[in-house]
Each structure stands twice: as structure tokens, then as C-alpha cells.
Image (cartoon, rainbow, N blue to C red):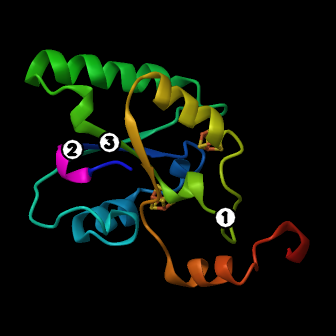
């Protein structure tokens, strides 16, 4: 269990394909309002936040991107990786009407783990989709 009170920096990883048409606004809004996947983040704490994509299937570029973040933030601001939390955006983690979860999710998680970074899942959560997920409406057999 990641203790978010110990973190100062949130790196949101979004699906590269989805970001071709999504600004990421709903992720940013959920973060700002501490809703959805951010509801456990203390409201009175001023986290820094960065958005990045996986770089495209199979997501291998993520390792280089996050390594770059770890190096630069350490060198320039002495922020250690223990103060960073990686947040996997809902477009990677959740099933919905438009698409299935990322087929490389386990691989992406293994890259993040290899870098020694803590991670959590989900960002913006659309209530209607969450209800449909609970009802099993996105199961392959019901499509
Ligand atoms: S979770 Fe939603 S708002 Fe965030 S990047 Fe993915 S599609 Fe865009
Ligand atoms: S690896 Fe997953 S998150 Fe990245 S572009 Fe492909 S489907 Fe999207």
C-alpha cells in the first residue's frame, strides 16, 4: 500500500494511442479536485504533477521516460524516487465502451517496478462507466 502522504510528485502515465485525441483534461480535473483515483490524496497538500504517455505499444519507452524523470529531478531538485508516485491513467487500467484496458499493462507495471517507483492505478473515473463495469456490461461476451 503506497502512503500518499510521503509523496510529493505524481507522474500520470496515459495511453499513447488514446492521447492522440485526448487532452488529458479529465485526468487533470480529477487530480485538481481529488476525485476518482485521486480521492485518497490529501486535499491540503500541494503535489507537483506531470503527464506523460507510455510512448506507444508495447510501452517500452516508458522505462526511458521515467528514468529521465528520476535522474533530472534528483539532480536539479534533490527529489528522490521515494517521493514520486506513478499513477496509471484509467485509459490504461479500465474497461469501457471505447476500449479495453491496455494489453501490456503487466509489462508496464514491471518496468515501473524495475525502476523502484511506487505506483497506483486509476485517474478520472466516469460514474456511468463504473456502473456499467460493475454490471458486467463490458465483458467480451456481452459486447
Ligand atoms: S484517463 Fe481519460 S482523460 Fe485521462 S488521458 Fe486517459 S482518456 Fe484522457
Ligand atoms: S502499450 Fe498500452 S497504454 Fe501504451 S499505447 Fe499501447 S495500449 Fe496504450
77 relative to 1, above or below: above
The image shows residue 131 at horizontal and vertical percentages of 60, 84
Asked whether residue 99 is drawn in magenta, I would say no
* Beta carbon of the mark 2 residue lies under 8 A of ligand 1: no
Q: Please rate how many residues cluster around mark 2, counting C-alpha atoms within 10 Å: few if below 14, some from 14 to 19, many from 20.
A: some
Whether residue 101 sits left or right of residue 31 in the image: it is right
Q: Dot 2 corresponds to which residue?
A: 7
Q: Which residue is drawn at 26% across and 28% down?
A: 81
The residue lying at 68 percent from left, 66 percent from top is: 98
Query: Mark 2 touching mark 3, by CB under 8 A?
Result: yes
Q: Is residue 130 above or below residue 9?
A: below
Number of on-image labels: 3
Q: Mark 1 points at which residue?
A: 95
Q: Which residue is drawn at 9% across and 24% down?
A: 77
Q: What stretch is highlighted in magenta?
A: 4-8
Instruction: Give the crowd class for mark 1: few <14, some 14-19, many >=20 residues within 10 Å.
Output: some
N-terminal-most mark, 3 or 1: 3
Q: Is mark 1 on a helix, strand or loop?
A: loop
Amino acid at each position: 500500500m503506497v502512503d500518499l502522504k510521503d509523496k510529493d510528485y505524481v507522474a500520470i502515465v496515459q495511453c499513447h494511442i488514446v492521447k492522440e485525441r485526448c487532452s488529458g483534461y479529465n485526468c487533470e480535473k480529477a487530480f485538481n479536485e481529488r476525485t476518482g483515483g485521486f480521492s485518497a490524496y490529501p486535499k491540503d497538500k500541494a503535489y507537483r504533477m506531470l503527464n506523460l504517455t507510455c510512448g506507444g505499444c508495447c510501452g517500452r519507452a516508458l522505462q526511458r521516460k521515467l528514468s529521465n524523470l528520476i535522474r533530472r529531478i534528483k539532480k536539479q531538485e534533490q527529489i528522490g524516487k521515494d517521493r514520486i508516485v506513478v499513477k496509471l491513467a484509467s485509459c490504461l487500467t479500465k474497461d469501457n465502451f471505447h476500449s479495453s484496458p491496455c494489453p501490456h499493462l503487466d509489462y508496464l507495471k514491471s518496468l515501473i517496478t524495475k525502476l523502484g517507483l511506487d505506483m497506483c492505478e486509476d485517474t478520472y473515473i466516469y460514474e456511468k462507466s463504473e456502473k456499467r463495469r460493475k454490471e458486467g456490461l463490458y465483458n467480451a461476451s456481452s459486447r
